[in-house]
Amino acid sequence: MTTTLGAFVLGSPDPRALADFYRALLRWEEVDRSPEWVRLKDPEHERPSLSFQFEPDHCPPVWPPTAGTQQMQAHLDVQVDDLEAETERACALGATMAKYQPQEGVRVMRDPHGHPFCLFLPGA
Protein backbone atom coordinates (compact mmCIF):
# COMPACT_ATOMS: atom_id res chain seq x y z
CA MET A 1 0.00 0.00 0.00
CA THR A 2 1.31 3.46 -0.92
CA THR A 3 0.21 6.80 0.43
CA THR A 4 1.04 10.04 -1.33
CA LEU A 5 0.09 13.62 -0.64
CA GLY A 6 -2.24 14.38 -3.53
CA ALA A 7 -2.88 18.09 -3.09
CA PHE A 8 -2.88 21.07 -0.82
CA VAL A 9 -6.09 23.14 -0.96
CA LEU A 10 -6.55 26.82 -0.09
CA GLY A 11 -9.98 28.35 0.49
CA SER A 12 -10.70 31.65 -1.21
CA PRO A 13 -13.57 34.01 -1.99
CA ASP A 14 -12.21 34.06 -5.58
CA PRO A 15 -10.39 30.80 -6.37
CA ARG A 16 -9.66 31.77 -9.97
CA ALA A 17 -7.89 34.99 -8.99
CA LEU A 18 -5.87 33.29 -6.25
CA ALA A 19 -4.93 30.44 -8.60
CA ASP A 20 -3.73 33.00 -11.15
CA PHE A 21 -1.44 34.51 -8.48
CA TYR A 22 0.09 31.14 -7.52
CA ARG A 23 0.34 29.98 -11.16
CA ALA A 24 2.51 33.02 -11.87
CA LEU A 25 4.46 32.80 -8.59
CA LEU A 26 5.29 29.09 -8.89
CA ARG A 27 5.35 28.93 -12.70
CA TRP A 28 2.98 25.97 -12.53
CA GLU A 29 0.33 25.02 -15.04
CA GLU A 30 -3.42 24.94 -14.66
CA VAL A 31 -5.13 21.56 -14.81
CA ASP A 32 -8.78 22.30 -13.94
CA ARG A 33 -10.78 25.53 -13.73
CA SER A 34 -14.36 26.24 -12.75
CA PRO A 35 -15.91 29.14 -10.84
CA GLU A 36 -15.59 27.21 -7.57
CA TRP A 37 -12.42 25.13 -8.07
CA VAL A 38 -9.01 25.50 -9.73
CA ARG A 39 -6.12 23.02 -9.65
CA LEU A 40 -2.48 23.75 -10.50
CA LYS A 41 0.42 21.34 -10.89
CA ASP A 42 4.15 21.51 -11.25
CA PRO A 43 4.90 20.89 -14.95
CA GLU A 44 7.53 18.33 -13.92
CA HIS A 45 5.47 16.41 -11.34
CA GLU A 46 1.87 15.21 -11.31
CA ARG A 47 1.51 15.39 -7.50
CA PRO A 48 1.18 17.05 -5.17
CA SER A 49 -0.95 19.71 -6.78
CA LEU A 50 -2.18 22.99 -5.38
CA SER A 51 -5.92 23.63 -5.51
CA PHE A 52 -8.21 26.52 -4.65
CA GLN A 53 -11.81 26.13 -3.56
CA PHE A 54 -14.57 28.69 -3.21
CA GLU A 55 -15.20 29.79 0.37
CA PRO A 56 -17.46 32.84 0.43
CA ASP A 57 -16.85 33.47 4.14
CA HIS A 58 -13.04 33.17 4.00
CA CYS A 59 -11.39 35.02 6.88
CA PRO A 60 -7.62 35.48 6.49
CA PRO A 61 -5.48 34.49 9.47
CA VAL A 62 -3.62 37.01 11.59
CA TRP A 63 0.20 37.00 11.45
CA PRO A 64 1.87 36.86 13.83
CA PRO A 65 -0.76 34.87 15.73
CA THR A 66 -2.78 36.75 18.32
CA ALA A 67 -5.08 35.12 20.86
CA GLY A 68 -8.74 35.35 19.94
CA THR A 69 -8.14 35.89 16.21
CA GLN A 70 -8.25 33.64 13.17
CA GLN A 71 -5.18 31.42 13.50
CA MET A 72 -2.97 30.23 10.67
CA GLN A 73 -3.44 26.48 10.37
CA ALA A 74 -1.01 25.91 7.50
CA HIS A 75 1.21 27.82 5.11
CA LEU A 76 3.23 27.14 1.98
CA ASP A 77 7.05 27.25 1.95
CA VAL A 78 8.51 28.21 -1.42
CA GLN A 79 12.26 27.70 -1.87
CA VAL A 80 13.98 30.37 -3.97
CA ASP A 81 17.55 31.04 -5.12
CA ASP A 82 17.38 34.84 -4.83
CA LEU A 83 15.32 35.98 -1.85
CA GLU A 84 15.31 39.70 -2.67
CA ALA A 85 14.40 39.24 -6.35
CA GLU A 86 11.64 36.71 -5.60
CA THR A 87 10.24 38.91 -2.82
CA GLU A 88 10.02 41.79 -5.29
CA ARG A 89 8.44 39.52 -7.92
CA ALA A 90 5.88 38.17 -5.43
CA CYS A 91 4.95 41.73 -4.44
CA ALA A 92 4.60 42.73 -8.10
CA LEU A 93 2.18 39.79 -8.51
CA GLY A 94 0.04 41.03 -5.61
CA ALA A 95 1.62 39.61 -2.43
CA THR A 96 2.57 41.72 0.56
CA MET A 97 5.45 41.22 2.95
CA ALA A 98 4.47 40.71 6.58
CA LYS A 99 5.77 43.31 9.02
CA TYR A 100 7.06 40.62 11.38
CA GLN A 101 9.93 38.59 9.94
CA PRO A 102 11.11 35.86 12.38
CA GLN A 103 14.43 34.79 10.83
CA GLU A 104 17.18 35.45 8.29
CA GLY A 105 16.90 33.79 4.89
CA VAL A 106 13.10 33.67 5.07
CA ARG A 107 10.43 36.19 4.05
CA VAL A 108 6.96 35.77 5.47
CA MET A 109 4.53 36.93 2.78
CA ARG A 110 0.76 37.14 2.40
CA ASP A 111 -0.95 36.23 -0.84
CA PRO A 112 -3.66 38.52 -2.27
CA HIS A 113 -6.32 36.79 -0.12
CA GLY A 114 -4.30 36.90 3.09
CA HIS A 115 -2.88 33.36 3.29
CA PRO A 116 0.65 33.43 4.72
CA PHE A 117 3.42 31.79 2.72
CA CYS A 118 7.18 31.87 3.09
CA LEU A 119 9.89 32.42 0.54
CA PHE A 120 13.12 30.87 1.80
CA LEU A 121 16.70 30.26 0.76
CA PRO A 122 18.15 26.74 0.76
CA GLY A 123 19.45 25.94 4.24
CA ALA A 124 17.31 28.58 5.96
Image: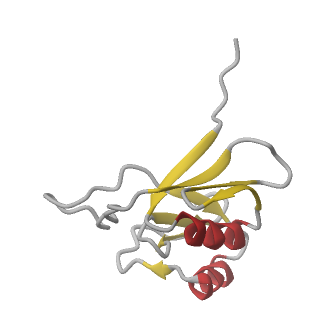
Which percent across, then down, holds residue 59? 31, 63
In screen coordinates, is 42 left or right of 85?
right
Q: How is the image coloured?
A: secondary structure
Which residue is found at the position 34% from the left and 65% from the top? 60
Which residue is found at the position 47% from the left and 81% from the top? 96
Which percent across, then down, holds residue 65? 26, 61
41, above or below 46, in the image: below
Residue at the outermost front position = 35
Residue at the outermost left position = 68
Question: Which image quadrant is residue 99 in?
Answer: bottom left
In screen coordinates, is 17 left or right of 74?
right
Residue at the outermost right position = 44
111, above or below 30, in the image: below
Camera-side residue of 35 and 25: 35
Camera-side residue of 119 and 41: 41
Which residue is found at the position 71% from the left and 73% from the top? 24
Q: Specify the quadrant that holds the N terminus.
A: top right
